[in-house]
Image (cartoon, rainbow, N blue to C red):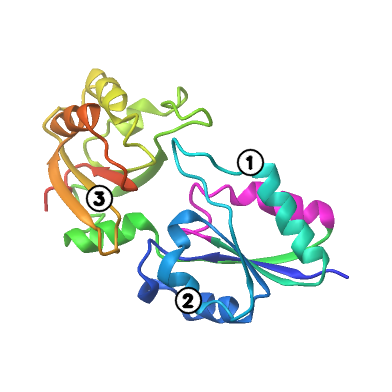
Amino acid sequence: MSGFVSFVSSGPGDPELLTLKAVARLQAADAVLFDDLSSGPILAHARAGADLVGVGKRAGRPSPRQDHVSRLLVEYASTGARVVRLKSGDAGLFGRLEEEITALDAAGIGYEVIPGVTSASAAAAAAGMPLTRRLTARRVQFVTGADVAGGLPADLNWAALADPAATTVVFMGKRTFPALVERLVAEGLPRDTPALLAEAVSTPEERLHRTTIGALAGQLAAERGDLPGLILYGPLAND
């Protein structure tokens, strides 16, 4: 007997940003395996009596291994259960989606992926800024600021990241941003390039801080804080 897994994107945290399809899957699920940033009021949409299992990962905190999370998905679905794998933001962006799909494929278990609002889009909306602009910001790029060990990835496309005409969004980058900025400056990006630090986007704890990449690097080197955050930089970040 085999169940079914719905990879549900929960958005950045505000339950009103869930899609109708996401809510429907939560209401029908027998089990919900959720990320830390997908907990709280979003789980109020889960069916009464459903198993709620926290499997989230946060930098610098004890977290379940990815193979354990994948195994739990297979085990629940193998009982015939309708399973929701609730992922923060959009499931396809830096969410280890492919590894979990691979485990389901190997076990012959069906699945679907339900997209959602990314934290990048929510941060730009909260700041009242566009991500693109004709002539001056024709390109948007998303990048992770952390490799599997939590350090700055060594194989990034530095020329692209130092493009002054692109809007760049750095996920999971508060810890490594000072090192990232040093490399960007070496590639020619000015230290006074506008930057936006967006923390706890779309939640009651939301904080937005407009600054420059140089000033933000100094700030984060001294104090990062515990709130989840992402960083946008480029010509539109001061809008």
Return the residue found at the far right. 1
Disc 1 marks a residue whose amino acid type is: Arg
Is there a contact, CB below 8 Å, between mark 1 and mark 2?
Answer: no
Please name the residue that numbered disc 2 is placed on.
44
- Is 93 colored magenta in this rendering? yes
Q: Earlier in the sequence, mark 1 or mark 3?
A: 1
Q: Is residue 84 left or right of residue 60?
A: right
Query: Residue 68 colored magenta?
Result: no
The CA distance from mark 3 to mark 2 is 25 Å
Which quadrant of the view contains residue 126?
A: bottom left
Q: Answer yes or no: is residue 134 visible.
A: no
Disc 1 target residue: 65
Q: Splitting the image into 4 quarters, where does residue 200 fall?
A: bottom left
Which residue is more in the foreground, 166 or 78? 78
| Residue in the foreground of this view, choosing between 173 and 164 | 173
Would you call the spot at circle 2 few (<14 residues within 10 Å), some (14-19), or many (20 or more)?
Answer: few
Position of residue 233 measured from the top left corner of the image (x, y, whole percent): 23, 41
| 208 sits to left or right of 203 | left
Closer-to-camera residue (80/193): 80
Residue 149 against residue 14 in the figure, above or below: above
Q: Is residue 144 above or below residue 77?
A: above
Question: How far apart in space, not on screen, are marks 1 and 3 (Cα)?
Answer: 28 Å
- Look at the numbered disc 3 and give the secondary structure of its residue: strand
Q: Which residues are magenta?
A: 87-107
Tell me what residue is drawn at x 57 percent, y 76 percent: 26
Residue beneath the point at 64% across and 43% down: 66
Q: Amino acid at mark 3?
A: Ala
Looking at the rendered structure, the kind of residue marked 2 is Ala
Disc nearer the start of the sequence (1/2):
2
Left or right side of 8 for 235: left
Residue designated by label 3: 198
